[in-house]
Amino acid sequence: SAVISQKPSRDICQRGTSLTIQCQVDSQVTMMFWYRQQPGQSLTLIATANQGSEATYESGFVIDKFPISRPNLTFSTLTVSNMSPEDSSIYLCSVEGLAGAGEQFFGPGTRLTVL
Amino acid sequence: AQSVAQPEDQVNVAEGNPLTVKCTYSVSGNPYLFWYVQYPNRGLQFLLKYITGDNLVKGSYGFEAEFNKSQTSFHLKKPSALVSDSALYFCAVRATNDYKLSFGAGTTVTVRA
């Protein structure tokens, strides 16, 4: 399985500011995913990031609020823009396992608190 | 559309007793099914999956799950629970022709000594 790291592991931010979360994988992967886990809730897919193309956003998520970069096959960033307390969540990146295997492997997450 | 239901918010068992965490799913076509575990302040760890073949799949830490197509279920089981199994468990599904995972709401398992 891939080894995935995220930075920062946690942060406390002020309302109206932006935070960029980094996701680094130890091997080249085609697809990377960004999820949000709100307090006490399940995971919700924000967007899918493919190298060399625009990210694909799920319903309820927009690029202006959650811009994503995917400059190469091992790295991606998610920015949470103009934050409000409702953005307080754990943000996780994931990658697909071996082709055809189906499972995704997750990073340790970034715990964001917005005051 | 695909979805997952985990009907129990919490499951409490005594150490050494069998543990079952329930999951039912809805998906177009054949499913890929997964179980993940999340320990406090940690990311999700993959436990096991059903892709095809034998309906009983075995995974990490002594867990297993049984795929039942007629009941659209994929319950997670462990014959003898440990206190260290206390965590949040998520069931997930995807269609075979889609990469998107849909997660259930999660079940908190507490194993008491």
Image (cartoon, rainbow, N blue to C red):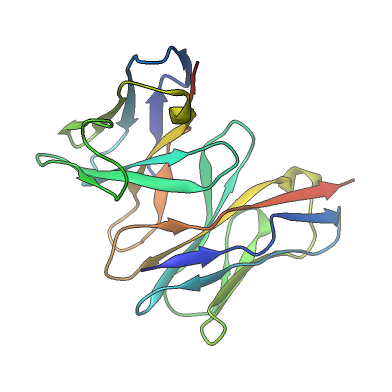
Can you say whether B78 is above or below B26 in the image? above
In percent of width and height, residue B42 lies at 56, 34
Task: Tell me the quarter of the image containing the N terminus of chain B.
Answer: bottom left
**Residue extending furthest bottom?**
B70
Q: Is residue B43 visible?
A: yes
Can you say whether B71 is above or below A83 in the image? below
Q: Is residue A12 left or right of residue A46?
A: right
Give the mark count: 0
In percent of width and height, residue A95 lies at 33, 45
Q: Residue at x 42, y 19 (%)?
A: A8
| Residue closer to the observer: A3 or B109 | B109
| Residue closer to the observer: A14 or B5 | A14
Q: Residue at x 31, y 29 (%)?
A: A24
Can you say whether B54 is above or below A69 in the image? below
Q: Is residue A32 visible?
A: no
In percent of width and height, residue A13 lies at 44, 13
Q: Residue at x 47, y 16 (%)?
A: A11
Q: Residue at x 38, y 78 (%)?
A: B30
Q: Is residue B108 left or right of residue A63?
A: right
In percent of width and height, residue B34 lies at 49, 61
**Residue extending furthest left?**
A52
